[in-house]
Image: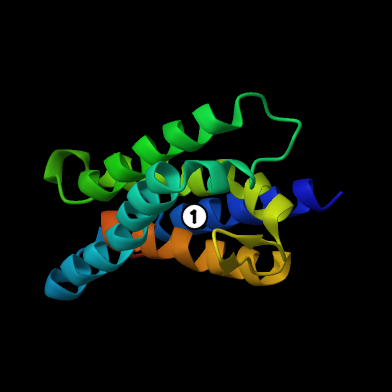
Amino acid sequence: MIYPICIAILIAAIVLFFALARGHFIQFGDAQRLLRLIAALPLLISGVALHFLHASSAAAMIPPVFPAPRFLVLFTGVLEILGATGLFVLAARRSTALWVAILMVAIFPANIYAAGQNIAGLQMPSVPVRLTMQVIYIWLVLLAGYGLPARSKRITP
């Protein structure tokens, strides 16, 4: 029962970001470039260290209902590495940020399944803690890729 609620919260975080912006974003220069680096590092570290160097441990996080856990770990590792690099490619920055946000929703069942477990020597956080972390990370990635949501000024007659 917790899966649908968490997934709905994560999707709502993405929708809220775009609803606030109404298609208008403000770039914020060096701070946004730094934010891209901050958002990209966990993707790159996780993609390489967890998904490739500790693929068996990461596969233990995959709920048994999903087939081919090792493949899913390697596949999502590739997606994380592509996401980390895509945040620095001007032509791909926005779409990359959106797809990374969607990836964070897609992988959340593994976070729920692993909650409270010890994986590769790391204690996995509880579901509420991980959900909060994931919402914050989704917003950081979207801010890094799109900029600050800015409401457009309405022209009154």
Q: Can I make out residue 85 in this image? A: yes
Q: Nearer the viewer, residue 59 or 88?
A: 59
| Residue 100 x, y percent position in the rendering | 40, 46
Seen at 56% across and 67% down, the residue is: 122
Image spot of residue 26 (x, y percent): 24, 64
Locate residue 100 relative to residue 13 in the image: left or right: left
Q: How is the image coloured?
A: rainbow
Picture residue at 19% right of the left edge, 64% below the top: 27
Q: How many marks?
A: 1
Which residue occupies the foreground of this view, 46 or 101? 46
Give the quadrant of residue 132: bottom right
Q: Is residue 154 visible?
A: no
Mark 1 crowd level (few <14, some 14–19, many ≥20, 10 Å Cα): some
Q: Residue furthest top?
A: 67
Location of residue 99 with respect to 29 vertically, above or below: above
User: In x, y percent, where is residue 73?
Assistant: 50, 37
Q: Nearer the viewer, residue 19 or 82?
A: 82
Q: Quadrant of the C terminus?
A: bottom left
Q: Which amino acid type is marked by label 1?
A: Ala
Q: Residue 144, position in %: x, y?
A: 28, 61
Residue at x 17%, y 66% (from the top left corner): 33
* Residue at disc 1, secondary structure: helix
Residue drawn at x 15%, y 39% is 91
Q: Name the residue carrying label 1.
A: 19
Vertical placement of residue 33 versus 81, above or below: below
Single out the residue that lies furthest toward the right: 1
In the rendered structure, the answer to whether residue 131 lies left or right of residue 151 reads right
> In which image quadrant can residue 124 be found?
bottom right
Asked if residue 52 lies left or right of residue 10, the reply is left
